[in-house]
RNA sequence: GUGGGUAUAGCACAGUUGGUUAGCGCGUCAGAUUGUGGCUCUGAAGGUCACGGGUUCGAAUCCCGUUAUCCACCCCA
């Protein structure tokens, strides 16, 4: 029997879980600033939800999904990304009848069957936002500005914003033909992977990392040249707003998102600091997705952000060890009466809203104080027969070593431990 | 799915050309005259040497397989 956590999954505990909570707090706060509400969708969906949206030909759908049949033989799939579920929920709950635009964010686990690697897990976590109801470039800019501001608040540097436009379905088709024609001429010189991409999804040939392929593709036509007037105007507008917002970006005609639903704007935030999986955030516009699900034509734009990758970046920056537990006071005890009383005191202090800790191992006074020190308690006290009899305890500041004499009954009314410092 | 590295205590690591009882540091627990932490000292617990085969008188050590893990390809966040 194998009792280990499954491959590509991990337990999060101790200091790490504290770091996650801190990160999540920043995410929730920034979404409040941007007036975006949370949505929580199921962890699994009907398999068709992903087939229809992510795309039948993509690697995600073809070989990376955790798909299973339930007891009534329905095909269900653990979500490999969140946009499809949110789009489904938007239609199912008729959120289009609510005030528009509808802006939602999520923090949720995703599942993909891949070989684990730095920044790539089988269960990973995504933060993302989806904005429904706008076809405007200003929506794209808003979404991008949130991601940009978030990285800034997290103090993450060395991340570049890359933007591109794939155009609408027409432009995309046109570009596909032009590109296929161009690549077709040099097909023999390309690597085996590229030959496969050529038939499956020609756009992907563009971001091959093989140098010899890149050389052959140097003169390839760019998507941006194939855009119609409206798509070009949209892209220009986005750039103008980003400039106005003072958000730096590079136009990168090679970024091609792997999911089928993207149209027009696509973007990525990339870094070279955490290994090969350098895309920290990826997103774009998906105006065709809602109609694919049977809804009315609805403008939509959003992104997904890989939180494990963000954590890797945060770990690189925060080198300073810091205490992550805040413990106001340790109440130790000696003797039978002390033990009983101290338990009640700890409970009372907790009811008062203090972070209080006591002894539940019946350890020696010395061991109790050692423990208080290790957990980083700010104050400590020991309760025994003397203290109970005289209604007087010594409250010790564990950092300065200073002791304060106060009444035991007074301690029990304490709502803020530092009040005894004077 | 493909390729390469790694696997010894909770963590980080030693372990000689195969040789007897597998070690060190950190951490954990206990103690240093019995009611006061940090420093120091003493001691204890903790290992199927990833797992399964094979070679050998003898394997942590050599060989094969499996699994896990890390890195890269691929793919993507």
Image: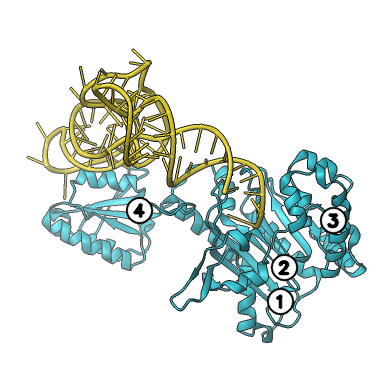
Describe the element under mark 2 as helix, strand or loop.
loop
Residue under mark 1: which chain is it in?
A
The residue under label 3 is A180
| Lower position in the chain sequence, tag 1 or tag 3 | 3
Give the answer, above or below, for where B17 lies relative to B10: above
| Lower position in the chain sequence, tag 1 or tag 4 | 4
Give the answer, above or below, for where A105 lies relative to A298: above
Query: Which of B20/A69 is in front?
Result: A69
Query: Which of A364/A253 is in front?
Result: A253
Q: Please report the residue visible at 55 percent of the width from the left and 59 percent of the height from the top.
A: A125
Assess whether mark 2 and mark 1 are in contact (beta carbons under 8 angstroms).
yes
Cα gap from disc 2 to disc 3, whole angstroms? 20 Å
Same chain for mark 2 and mark 3? The answer is yes
**Badge 2: residue crowd in 10 Å (few <14, some 14–19, many ≥20):** many
Residue under mark 3: which chain is it in?
A
Q: Colour of chain A?
A: cyan
Residue under mark 2: which chain is it in?
A
Same chain for mark 2 and mark 4? The answer is yes
| Residue A353 falls in image quadrant | bottom left
Cα gap from disc 1 to disc 3, whole angstroms? 26 Å
Assess whether mark 3 and mark 1 are in contact (beta carbons under 8 angstroms).
no
The residue under label 4 is A3
The residue under label 1 is A292
Q: Colour of chain B?
A: yellow
Same chain for mark 1 and mark 4? The answer is yes
**Badge 3: residue crowd in 10 Å (few <14, some 14–19, many ≥20):** some
Cα gap from disc 1 to disc 2, whole angstroms? 9 Å
The residue under label 2 is A261
Query: Which of B54/A365 is in front?
Result: B54
Describe the element under mark 1 as helix, strand or loop.
helix
Left or right, residue A358 beside residue A269: left
Give the answer, above or below, for where A75 lies relative to B50: below
């Amino acid at each position: 029997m194998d009792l280990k956590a499954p491959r590509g999954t991990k337990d999060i505990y101790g200091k790490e879980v504290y770091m996650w909570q801190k990160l999540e707090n920043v995410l929730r706060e920034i979404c409040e600033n941007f007036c975006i509400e949370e949505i929580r969708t199921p962890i699994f969906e009907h398999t068709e939800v992903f087939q229809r949206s992510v795309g039948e030909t993509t690697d995600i759908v073809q070989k990376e999904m955790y798909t299973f049949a339930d007891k009534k033989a329905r095909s269900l799939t653990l979500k490999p990304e969140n946009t499809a579920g949110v789009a489904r929920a938007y239609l199912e709950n008729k959120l289009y009848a609510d005030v528009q635009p509808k802006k939602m964010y999520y923090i949720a686990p995703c599942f993909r069957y891949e070989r684990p690697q730095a920044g790539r897990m089988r269960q990973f976590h995504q933060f993302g936002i989806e904005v429904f109801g706008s076809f405007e470039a200003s929506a794209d800019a808003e979404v991008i500005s949130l991601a940009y501001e978030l990285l800034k608040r997290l103090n993450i540097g060395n991340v570049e914003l890359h933007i591109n436009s794939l155009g609408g379905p027409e432009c995309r088709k046109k570009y596909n033909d032009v590109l296929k024609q161009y690549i077709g001429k040099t097909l023999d010189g390309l690597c085996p992977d590229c030959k496969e991409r050529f038939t499956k999804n020609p756009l992907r040939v563009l971001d091959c990392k093989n140098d010899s392929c890149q050389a052959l593709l140097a003169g390839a036509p760019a998507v941006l040249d194939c855009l119609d007037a409206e798509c070009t105007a949209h892209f220009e507008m986005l750039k103008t707003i980003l400039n106005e917002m003072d958000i730096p970006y590079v136009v990168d005609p090679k970024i091609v998102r792997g999911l089928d639903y993207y149209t027009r704007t696509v973007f990525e935030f990339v870094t070279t600091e955490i290994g090969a999986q350098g895309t920290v955030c990826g997103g774009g516009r998906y105006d065709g997705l809602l109609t694919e699900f049977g809804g009315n034509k609805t403008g939509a734009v959003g992104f997904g952000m890989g939180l494990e990758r963000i954590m890797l970046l945060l770990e690189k920056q925060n080198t300073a060890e810091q205490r992550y537990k805040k413990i106001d006071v340790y109440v130790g005890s000696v003797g039978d009466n002390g033990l009983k009383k101290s338990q009640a005191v700890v409970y009372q202090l907790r009811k008062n809203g203090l972070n209080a800790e006591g002894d539940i191992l019946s350890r020696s006074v010395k061991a109790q104080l050692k423990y208080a020190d290790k957990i980083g308690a700010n104050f400590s006290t020991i309760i025994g027969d003397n203290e109970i009899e005289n209604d007087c305890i010594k409250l010790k500041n564990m950092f300065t070593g200073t002791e304060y004499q106060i009444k035991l009954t007074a301690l029990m009314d304490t709502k803020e431990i530092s009040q005894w410092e004077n």
